[in-house]
Amino acid sequence: MKNFIMAAVTVLVTLSAQAKVKIETVNYKDGETALEGFIAYDEAKLKNKKGPGVVVVHDWMGVSDYVKMRAEQLAEMGYVAFVADIYGKGMRPKDGKEAAEFAGKYRNGDRKLLRARATAAYEELKKNKHVDANKISATGYCFGGTTVLEMARAGLPLKGVVSFHGGLSSVNPDDAKNIKTKVLALHGAIDPYVPATEVSQFQKELNDAKVDYQFVAYSGAVHAFSQKGAGNDPTQGAAYNEVADKRSFVAAKNFLEEVNK
């Protein structure tokens, strides 16, 4: 009996160890710019086969524990998740003011550079030994949501992109014609940073280009609704909304399952 119990415990410990998500630092480059991302995967979920990949793009605070947590969630579902580094190795904003400066450089300024940094992450994930290079998607939060839409507009051969409370504006509306992938935009219905005019223009661009897209607006939700660190006061324009967070997670999960069939 004692030997049986010991054997059972050993099996449980082994299974637990096998199910653990691995997170590894990945140093890569965009041209001469050093970047530092993270890869998350669960070998037990992959079952010795290559799995679908997901590029995960950070919010305006750069690579952080939050975006790593989101990558872990994806890994637990069987994806190989790669946390992209848009800003550059060691470039981590110390506060909101600096984050606005960092993000503004790309979002309001050099969209070409934003696309290049995102593409570098895509290419890095594509060559990973655990990834099915024909099944790569992208998800992003706030600034990252803007970024994954730019990846789609750049014409990257992604299976799908998911933008969580991201900016929807485009520098060139005709770029929607380059989109080869399915799009899911998850939006706070009363987000003051993404006004109705921006939403309408975004939908018009995708409609005109005949893009396969879904747009979901969550009532009562403002900017950053999936991030607990945003606080709980929607009058500030950015705040966590538990209902919207849970609903958007399920929507993204279902969408990724659909595009990776």
Image: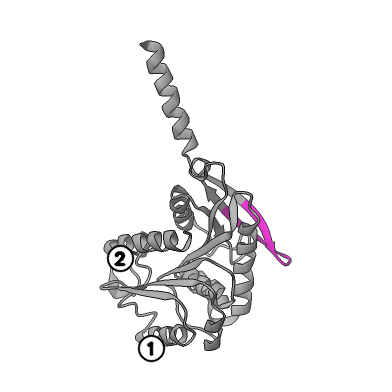
Quadrant of the image for the N terminus?
top left
Q: Which residue was labeled with disc 2? A: 244
In the rendered view, tell whether residue 50 sits above or below residue 91: above
Residue lying farthest to the right in this orientation: 32
Where is residue 49 drawn, in percent x and y? 56, 46
Q: Secondary structure at mark 1?
A: helix
Q: Identify the amino acid type marked 2.
A: Ala
Q: Is residue 226 left or right of residue 98?
A: left
Residue lying farthest to the front in this orientation: 261
Q: Identify the amino acid type marked 1.
A: Thr
Task: Tell me the distance, in whole angstroms, between the alpha carbons under discs 1 and 2.
Answer: 22 Å
Badge 2: residue crowd in 10 Å (few <14, some 14–19, many ≥20): many
Badge number at residue 197: 1
In the rendered view, tell whether residue 102 sits above or below residue 5: below
Residue 124 in view in this figure: yes
Instruction: Specify start and end residues of the magenta stretch as a single range.
Output: 26-38
